[in-house]
C-alpha cells in the first residue's frame, strides 16, 4: 500500500512526521510525501527521505497513493483527482461546511478524525484532545503576553505585586491545561463548567471551582458543552458576571458540537472588567463565547483586550504535528488489517469515523451504516 502525506495549504502542521514514517515503513507499505510538507513544522524533505519516504510533487502523490492523509481536507475542485482513493482527514461534517456529496461522487472512502468516538479505547487516536491541550497551554501564554501585569505574586524591595486572577470558562481538555499552565505561572485560578464531573479535576489542579446549581449533565457529549435551560443560563450569567469583574484574565473554551458557541460574556460584562484585562476566546471559530469576539483578530473594547483564535495549535506546529501524527498512526493500526485496507465496520472506531464509503455518504444516514455493519457481521 502507498500512503500519501499532503502539504497543508493553510496550516503550519504536517499530518505525519518523519519519525513515525521510519517506524511504520515496511515491505508492504510505502510513504509518498508532498514536497515541503513538513517545512512549516521544521521537518525538512531530507528528514523524510532519511526516514524512507519518497518526496514528490502534489499531483504525483495524489495520483500514486492508495491512501491519502491530511489535516485539512482537499478543496472540492481537487476531489475529482482522488477518485477511488481512501482519504483520512478532519471533515467536521457536523458544521455542514464540507461537500460530503462530492466525496461520494468521486467514490472516495473518507474517514474523519474528528468523528472518532471519545471512548477509553480510542483515546490514543483523539485528535480533539491532543489539539485542545495545546490550545489551553498557548491561550495562557498569549494572555500573559498581552496582560500589562505579572502573573505570579512578587515581593520586592519596591513593594509587593499580587498574583493575577485568572478565570477559565469550560474545564474540558483545553480548560484543564489552561488551569495547569496558569497555576505554574503563579496566578490565582478559578474555573467554571456546566459538568459537575469536572469539579474534582479542577480542584485537583489547585483551582477553585465556580459552581452553578441545576446544570444538565450529559456524559455522552464528547467533551463539548451541553445546551442548558433558560433558567440555568440566567443563573450562570449572574455568577459569571460576578467573577469576571474581579478577573485579570478570562479564557473561554466552551463549544457546542454542530452549533454556535454559547455566549458566556456579554458586552456589559466586558465593560465591567478592570482596565488592561484580557479575554482569550478559544471558541472564536464558532461565534465565540464573548459577544465581542472577532475570529483571528485582537481587538480592544475600551481598555479591555479580546483575542479570538480557535487554531492556537497552529502556533506550536512541531509538537502539534508530533501528537497529531501519533493519533493518526494509532488510527491506521485500527483501520488497516495487516497493513492492508480492510475496514471493519463492526469496529465502533472505524464505523463512526467513516463519513463516505464506496459512493455513499454515511454521515447522517444511519440506514447505510447499519447495512454495512450487517454485511460485516
Image: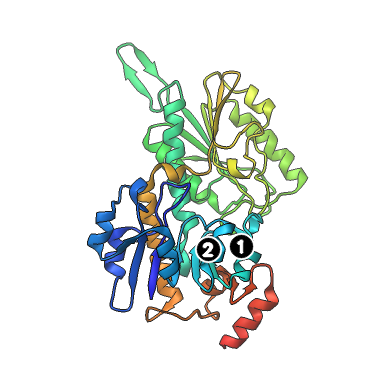
Residue at far top of view: 158
Question: In the rendered view of the protein, which quadrant contains the N terminus?
Answer: bottom left
The residue under label 2 is 118
Q: Does residue 205 show up?
A: no
Q: Quick one: 279 or 51, which is closer to the camera?
A: 51
Above or below residue 209? Residue 45 is below
Residue in the image at 47% along x and 67% along y: 122
Q: Residues within 10 Å of mark 1 (few under 14, many from 20)?
A: few
Residue in the image at 33% along x and 74% along y: 29
Q: Which mark is residue 362?
A: none
Q: Secondary structure at mark 2?
A: loop
Q: Going from the N terminus, do you reach mark 2 or mark 1 first?
A: 2
Question: In the rendered view of the protein, which quadrant contains the C terminus?
Answer: bottom right
Q: Position of residue 149 (x, y in %)?
A: 43, 21
Residue in the image at 59% along x and 43% along y: 285
Location of residue 140 (image quadrant): top left
Mark 1 and mark 2 in contact (Cβ < 8 Å)? no
Q: Which mark is residue 220?
A: 1
Q: Does residue 4 show up?
A: yes
Q: Secondary structure at mark 1?
A: loop
Above or below residue 94? Residue 253 is above
Residue in the image at 45% along x and 65% along y: 62
Q: Position of residue 80 (x, y in %)?
A: 56, 65
Q: Position of residue 263 (x, y in %)?
A: 67, 39
Q: Quick one: 323 or 220, which is closer to the camera?
A: 323
Q: Quick one: 277 or 315, which is closer to the camera?
A: 315
- Measure the C-alpha gap from mark 2 to mark 1: 9 Å
Q: Position of residue 91 (x, y in %)?
A: 56, 59
Amino acid at each position: 500500500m502507498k500512503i500519501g502525506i499532503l502539504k497543508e495549504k493553510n496550516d503550519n502542521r504536517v499530518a505525519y512526521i518523519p519519525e513515525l514514517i521510519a517506524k511504520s515503513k515496511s515491505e508492504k507499505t510505502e510513504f509518498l510525501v508532498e514536497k515541503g510538507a513538513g517545512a512549516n513544522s521544521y521537518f525538512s524533505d531530507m528528514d523524510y527521505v532519511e526516514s524512507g519516504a519518497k518526496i514528490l510533487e502534489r499531483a504525483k502523490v495524489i495520483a500514486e497513493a492508495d491512501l491519502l492523509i491530511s489535516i485539512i481536507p482537499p478543496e472540492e475542485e481537487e476531489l475529482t483527482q482522488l477518485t477511488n482513493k481512501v482519504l483520512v482527514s478532519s471533515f467536521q461534517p457536523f458544521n455542514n461546511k464540507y461537500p460530503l456529496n462530492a466525496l461520494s461522487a468521486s467514490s472516495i472512502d473518507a474517514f474523519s478524525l474528528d468523528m472518532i468516538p471519545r471512548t477509553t479505547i480510542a483515546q490514543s487516536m483523539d485528535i480533539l484532545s491532543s489539539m485542545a491541550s495545546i490550545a489551553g497551554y498557548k491561550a495562557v501564554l498569549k494572555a500573559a503576553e498581552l496582560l500589562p501585569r505579572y502573573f505570579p505574586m512578587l515581593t520586592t524591595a519596591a513593594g509587593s505585586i499580587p498574583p493575577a486572577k485568572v478565570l477559565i470558562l469550560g474545564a474540558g481538555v483545553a480548560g484543564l491545561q489552561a488551569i495547569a499552565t496558569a497555576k505554574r505561572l503563579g496566578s490565582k485560578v478559578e474555573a467554571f463548567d456546566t459538568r459537575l464531573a469536572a469539579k474534582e479535576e479542577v480542584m485537583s489542579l489547585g483551582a477553585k471551582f465556580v459552581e452553578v446549581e441545576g446544570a444538565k449533565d450529559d456524559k455522552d457529549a464528547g467533551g463539548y458543552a451541553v445546551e442548558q435551560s433558560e433558567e440555568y443560563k440566567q443563573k450562570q450569567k449572574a455568577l459569571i458576571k460576578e467573577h469576571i469583574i474581579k478577573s485579570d484574565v478570562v479564557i473561554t473554551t466552551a463549544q457546542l458540537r454542530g452549533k454556535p458557541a454559547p455566549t458566556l460574556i456579554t458586552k456589559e460584562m466586558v465593560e465591567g472588567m478592570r482596565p488592561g484585562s484580557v479575554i482569550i476566546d478559544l471558541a472564536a471559530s464558532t461565534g465565540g463565547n464573548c459577544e465581542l469576539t472577532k475570529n483571528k483578530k485582537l481587538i480592544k473594547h475600551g481598555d479591555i483586550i479580546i483575542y479570538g483564535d480557535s487554531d492556537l495549535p497552529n502556533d506550536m506546529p512541531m509538537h502539534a504535528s508530533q501528537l497529531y501524527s501519533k493519533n493518526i498512526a494509532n488510527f491506521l493500526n485500527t483501520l488497516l488489517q495487516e497493513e492492508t485496507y480492510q475496514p471493519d465496520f463492526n469496529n465502533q472506531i472505524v464505523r463512526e469515523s467513516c463519513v463516505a464509503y464506496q459512493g455513499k455518504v454515511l454521515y447522517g444516514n444511519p440506514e447505510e451504516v447499519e447495512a454495512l455493519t450487517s454485511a460485516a457481521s
